[in-house]
Structure formats: structure tokens, C-alpha cells
Image (tube, rainbow, N blue to C red):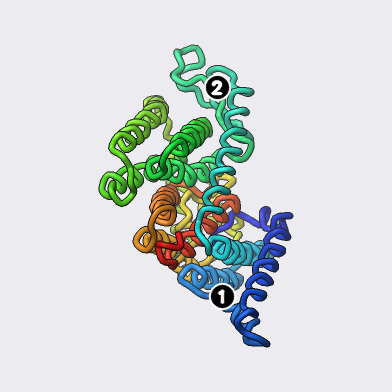
Amino acid sequence: MPAVNADHVVAYPVDFIIILALAWVFLSGFKETRRTRKGPAALGRALADLFKPDLISWAIAASAVAVALSLYHAPRPEPTLAALVDVARLYAVYVLFRQLAAAGPRPVLVGLLVAAVAHSTLCLIEFFAQNNFGLWEKPGWGAFIFTGASPEAARLLIARGGGTFEPNVTSQFLQMALPFAAIYFLAAAGRRRFLYLAIFFLAAAATFVTFSRGGWLGAAAALAVVIAATWLKKRAVGAPTWALAAMTAAGVILLIPAAAVVLARGAQGDQLSASYRLADWRAAFAMIRDHPLLGAGKGNYLELARLYNPWTLEYPVHNVFLLSWAETGILGLGAFVALLAGAFRAAGRAIRGSSGVGAAFGLAAFAAFAGVVLRMFVSMSFVHPFVNLSFIALAAAAAAAWGRPPSAR
């Protein structure tokens, strides 16, 4: 997978939790298998059930090969070797969540929405605690952007946005949670419908106050997929017309302030960000031209970027596909595209092969993946483990959910 550098590939405490959880899952599967089989065959069966290959797992394995091969051109091998820890973490999380969702995607859904509520609440607390009237500041960035032509002019937005975590990372996680809250609002019944609606508005408000334009773009794309799909498949989803109309109106209303901010900034001639990104894209293409097959070395983009663009920013090119190709070559890019294709395939199968919770989960996952992929063309926050591990967990749950008969869901 793409990586900024080696700063985030240390052994997190959560890695030990993943290892323990995998051990518990394996032992549980082994005990279950031994009820019908004895001896070494039971062990082999348990391993086969836990690590059964599919398109996503093969794509992760191929990305590990691409990372290893990218060592050939890497000026610093340390981040490339450390990036293999990222790949192992991705594979472990995929196996764990696929097994966790074997009986249905509900545990993953609940965990995702609980995490979304927690992060949204932290975002909004920080927003209201730190707003300083007329100033937009992303935490840790020192980028002060007024919405008026001058500090003395009338201002459109009165806020300081952000979140406990880096705002672009937080917004990308929340944009994955939004379609789940939306689709379960449409598909649920009774009072639960309004619980999902409350989660939707909480996550939407938090996404807005991150002031991440990429987050707004991804959220808008995900909601567009949800609304279009449910209008087309209203009977299959079980969404009443009034709920669909309400969700459509909510999506439009939520986009109005975000569009107003973007237009206001454009009217001020905010071309600096675009010019930097275009320059970095050109540098990435030049790096790809010099290292098309094996890449320049996983985690080594910044080591070489200033050879192509002396004014490059302190973070890599804002395009995950270009970053993947530049660092790990054509094999790495192919593995990454295969992983995305596997995620969409799993979501599509969940929609077609499930009913109730499973089908709703598949549709929400498909919408979330669409928003993430669109954002990848203009952002690099997917490289953060918080985002790509969440993506892998959703893909794993979708991959597990479609294969059971509808009566089991």
C-alpha cells in the first residue's frame, strides 16, 4: 500500500491486539473443526478456513512483493523494509475482520458507527472550543485562510475547523461512515431509523468542520451513490418514499455551506494549492518515467521528490495512484488497483447475494468505496493506517457477508 514515510509503521499497541485476536479466532476455528475431524487434518482445515485466498488477499500479497522489489532503487531501504509491516498489518486485519463478519456484518457495522460517533463528537467539541471567529485553521498546519477579501471584510465562515486527529484523515474516515448511517436510516424500521439519522447528521457536521475539501468531495460522491441506488432499488432496500425524499433533501442541504466555502475561496483567487498539486503531479510523472517497473522505493518519495521539484511540499503528491506507481512501480499500482477492484466486487456480491442487513451493508460499502476512490485522485490521506485499515475492515466484512444463504442473515 502507499506510504508517506516510515513514521507510522512502528508496532502499535493495536498490533498486539490483532495478533491475540487472530490467535483466538484460529483456536476457536480449530476447536470447531476438531468436532468433525481429528488429527493434523483438523489443523489444516482450520488454517484453510482462516486464510482462504480471494482477490483482496492476493492483491495484498502482490503489494508485499512490489514493496520488496522496490528496494532495488530505494535510496533509503529502512522505510521500504518497514513498509512491509504495513502490508502484514493489512493482511492480518483483512483475515480478522473477514472471520469476524462470518456470521453477518452487524459487528463491523456497530463498531464503525460507534467509532464514527466518537470521532465526530471529538471533532465538534474541538470546533466549538477553539473557534476564533473569522479564522479557519487546520490543527497543526498554521494555514490561516480568511473567507473575505481581507481580515476587515465581511466573512462567510466563522469557525476554526479540525479534529483531534489530522483533519483530512478524520474526514476520510467519516466519509466512509456516512453512507452506512444513510443507508441504514433508509432500510431500518421503527425507532432505529431515527438513531441512524442522528448518527448521519452528527458525522456530517463533523465532516464539515474538518474543512477538508477532499472530505466534502468524497462524502458527496458516497451520498450520491446511496441516493441514486436506493431510488433505483427502492423496493429491494425497503426504503419508503418519504425517507428517500428526506435523505435527498438532507444531502443537498449539507452541500450548500461546503459549496459556498469553496466558491468564496475561488473568488479570492485561491490558486496556490492547485498550483502546488499540479507541480507535484508533474514531479510524480517524471519519477514514474525514470522508475516505471520497480518504483523508486516504498516510502522514499520525499527522498527523491525535490530532485524533480525543488519546491515540493513536505508531503507527497496528492494522488494515491501516482504515489503508488512512483514508489512501487507498475506491479505495486496493479496490486493496488486489484485491491480496490476486490473491494467493489465483494460489495457487489453482498448486494446481490444477501438480503436485509447483508444487502444494506453491501450497498453502503459500495458507496463508501466510491467516495474513497474519487478522493484518491486529489488526496493522499488514504495512506494513513487509520483510513486504509478501516477500508480493509469494511472490504473484509463485505467479502464475508455475501457467501451465506439469505436465511442466515
Q: Residue at x 48, y 33 (%)?
A: 198
Q: Residue at x 38, y 45 (%)?
A: 187
Q: Determine the secondary structure under disc 1.
A: helix
Q: Which three-letter amino acid code belongs to the residue tagged 1?
A: Asp
In the depicted view, which residue is nearer to us: 121 or 234? 234
Pinpoint residue 55: horizontal percent, then vertical percent: 46, 71
Residue 184 versus residue 80: which sits nearer the camera? 184
Q: Amino acid at mark 2?
A: Leu
Find the distance from the CA under tag 1 to the CA under tag 2.
54 Å
Q: Nearer the viewer, residue 16 or 136?
A: 16
Residue at point 56%, 35% (across, down): 120
Tell me which residue sits at (51%, 42%) in the image: 174
Question: Image check: 134 left or right of 35?
Answer: left
Q: Position of residue 36 (x, y in %)?
A: 60, 82
Where residue 310 appears, x then y in whole percent?
A: 55, 48
Q: Which residue is mark 2?
A: 135
Say which quadrant the C terminus sits in. bottom left
Res. 63 in view: yes
Number of callouts = 2
Q: In this image, 241 relative to 148: left or right?
A: left
Residue 126 lies, with reference to residue 277, above or below; the image says above
Q: In the rendered view, would you say 240 is above or below 385?
A: above
In terms of sequence position, does the residue under pointer 1 or pointer 2 come before the other?
Answer: 1
> Which label number is shown at residue 49?
1
Q: Position of residue 199 (x, y in %)?
A: 50, 36
Quarter occupied by residue 74: bottom right
Name the mark nearer the viewer: 1 or 2. 1
